[in-house]
Image (tube, helix red, strand yellow):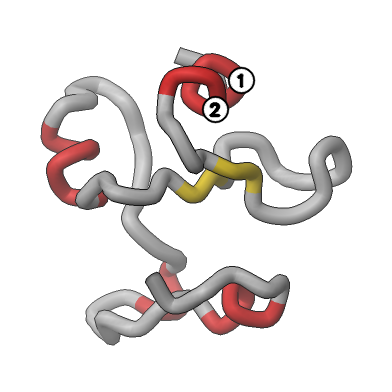
Amino acid sequence: MTGTLLLAAIPGASVNGHPHRRLPGNLTLPGIEATDLLDRLPGIAASTGSACNTGSGEPSHVLIAIGLTRE
């Protein structure tokens, strides 16, 4: 499923960053537990956060800097 389909299918889903000048696949999916999503996507390489935040449990400082909330 492409990002466009996810945006259309999930209420409140949004793109993180510039709509065109960004890395693909960087979305916010509110109301969805990241680990549950990954469990339902076998065969797809994805992560619940950045490598620099591994194990911290804190939101990405980059996502906070672009204006996203901690949630």
Which residue shows up at 54% across the image and 27% down it? 7
The image quadrant where one finds the N terminus is: top left
Picture layout, residue 71 above or below residue 56: above
| Residue positioned 32% across, 26% down in the render | 44
Taking the image as shown, residue 20 lies to the left or right of residue 12, namely right
Q: Position of residue 61 (x, y in %)?
A: 56, 83
64 displayed left or right of 45: right
In the rendered view, tell whether residue 12 sits above or below residue 57: above
CB within 8 Å, label 2 to label 1: yes
What amino acid type is highlighted by mark number 2? Leu
Within-10-Å neighbours for mark 1: few <14, some 14–19, many 20+:
few
Q: Give amino acid for label 1.
A: Thr
Q: How many residues crowd around disc 2 within 10 Å: few (fewer than 14), some, or many (20 or more)?
A: some
The residue carrying mark 2 is 7
Q: Pinpoint residue 57: horizontal percent, then vertical percent.
A: 26, 81
In the structure shown, which secondary structural element does the residue marked by tag 1 occupy?
Answer: helix
Give the residue pinned by disc 1.
4
Say left or right for 27 vs 50. Answer: right
